Image (cartoon, grey):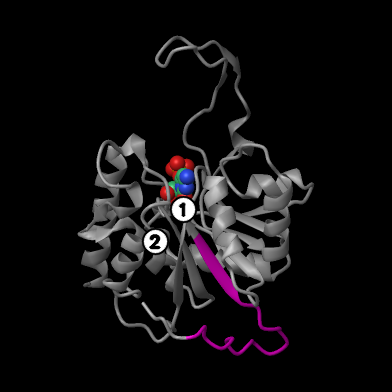
């Protein structure tokens, strides 16, 4: 990880102004659904902490020149040294990879608060912000690039999305977990999407959303929706799944094993 001053802006394509992109990675969750142990972001996948995979996934995009990691409130020092001991760019050498700076800041009680603390730490000069869950360590670089591209093309907020395999029911939640729950509606599956991260934003829009919206939300794009702005989707990727339950760790290890076989690293 580099502690050098922030890099100069990349040379823009002809006719396109330079727009710098930063990624904020909220990684302050405990991950209780994964079972007892270290905070989720620090659990190993293929021998490397999940957070390191997530940082690499952002740094592998040519567009991203700064990553802000939001660490557990009492674990910023530990996260900083963890990142210092791992090479930022994993995988085979590639001419497309440049330098990426990494800041580490302490997080908050909720995901929303952690993202806000990450945004507060962003230096000026970054006009596009990605917000990427540490819990999605294996998102492919093409998905990251597609999100950035859509924001560069003028969308204020962009989410990677996939159609649903399961039919979804809206229920009257039971008082106690596991109790029977009356179904109240079955939304038309063809218009539903499961959304992933990184979600991409025009920075000013995301900052305004975090300053204005106080409702409890589970992603950043829904805050922008509440401002009355249109959020658009780009195709998501099945490997961008969120590591939430123990079975997801098994799947993530299998994806990594397949990549090693295919890429020879
Ligand atoms: O809990 P959930 O899986 O939705 O968390 C999504 C992401 O938000 C994870 O990467 C987690 O580390 C992060 N988070 C956070 N601060 C919190 C709670 C969750 O950064 N207080």
Lower sequence index among marks 1 and 2: 2
* Rendered image: mark on residue 54: 2
Q: Against 77, is 34 above or below?
A: above
Q: Answer whether residue 7 is magenta in the image.
A: yes
Q: CA distance from mark 1 to mark 2?
A: 8 Å
Q: Against 43, is 183 above or below?
A: above
What residue lies at 73% left-to-right and 87% top-to-bottom?
15
What residue lies at 43% left-to-right and 50% top-to-bottom?
28
Mark 1 lies on a secondary structure that is loop
Mark 2 lies on a secondary structure that is helix
How many numbered tags mark residues here? Answer: 2
Mark 2 residue CB less than 8 A from any atom of ligand 1: yes
Image location of residue 116, percent across then percent down: 59, 54
Going by the image, does 214 lie left or right of 113? right
Q: Quadrant of the C terminus?
A: bottom left
The residue to which callout 1 is attached is 133
- Classified by dominant secondary structure, the portion drawn in magenta counts as loop
Stretch of the chain drawn in magenta: 5-24
Image location of residue 73, percent across then percent down: 43, 51
- Whether pointer 1 and pointer 2 mark residues with C-beta atoms closer than 8 Å, the reply is yes
Q: Against 224, is 188 above or below?
A: above
What residue lies at 51% left-to-right and 54% top-to-bottom?
197
Q: Answer whether residue 231 is magenta in the image.
A: no
Circle 2 Cα neighbour tier, 10 Å, few/some/many (<14 / 14–19 / ≥20): many
Mark 1 residue CB less than 8 A from any atom of ligand 1: yes
User: Looking at the image, which is closer to me, 160 or 108?
Assistant: 108
Image location of residue 178, percent across then percent down: 39, 14
Going by the image, does 187 lie left or right of 143? right
Q: Quadrant of the N terminus?
A: bottom left
Circle 1 Cα neighbour tier, 10 Å, few/some/many (<14 / 14–19 / ≥20): many
């Amino acid at each position: 990880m580099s502690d050098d001053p922030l890099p100069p802006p990349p040379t823009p394509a002809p006719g396109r102004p330079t727009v710098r992109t930063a990624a904020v990675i909220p990684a302050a969750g405990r991950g209780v659904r994964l079972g007892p142990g270290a905070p989720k972001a620090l659990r190993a996948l293929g021998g490397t902490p999940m957070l390191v995979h997530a940082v690499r996934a952002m740094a592998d995009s040519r567009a991203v020149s700064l990553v802000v990691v939001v660490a557990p409130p009492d674990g910023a020092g530990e996260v900083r040294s963890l990142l210092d001991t791992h090479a930022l760019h994993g995988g085979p050498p590639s001419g497309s990879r440049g330098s990426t700076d990494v800041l580490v800041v302490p997080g908050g009680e909720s995901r929303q608060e952690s993202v806000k603390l990450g945004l507060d730490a962003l230096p000026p000069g970054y006009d596009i912000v990605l917000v990427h869950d540490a819990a999605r360590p294996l998102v492919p670089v093409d998905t990251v690039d597609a999100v950035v591209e859509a924001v560069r093309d003028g969308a204020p907020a962009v989410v990677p999305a996939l159609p649903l395999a399961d039919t979804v029911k809206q229920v009257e939640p039971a008082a106690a977990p596991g109790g029977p729950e009356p179904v109240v509606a079955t939304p038309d599956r063809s218009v539903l999407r499961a959304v992933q991260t990184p979600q991409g934003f025009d920075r000013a829009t995301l900052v305004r959303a975090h300053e204005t919206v106080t409702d409890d939300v589970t992603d950043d794009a829904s805050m922008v929706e509440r401002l009355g702005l249109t959020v658009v989707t780009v195709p998501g990727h099945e490997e961008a799944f969120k590591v939430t339950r123990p079975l997801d760790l098994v799947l993530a290890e299998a994806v990594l094993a397949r990549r090693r076989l295919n890429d020879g690293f």
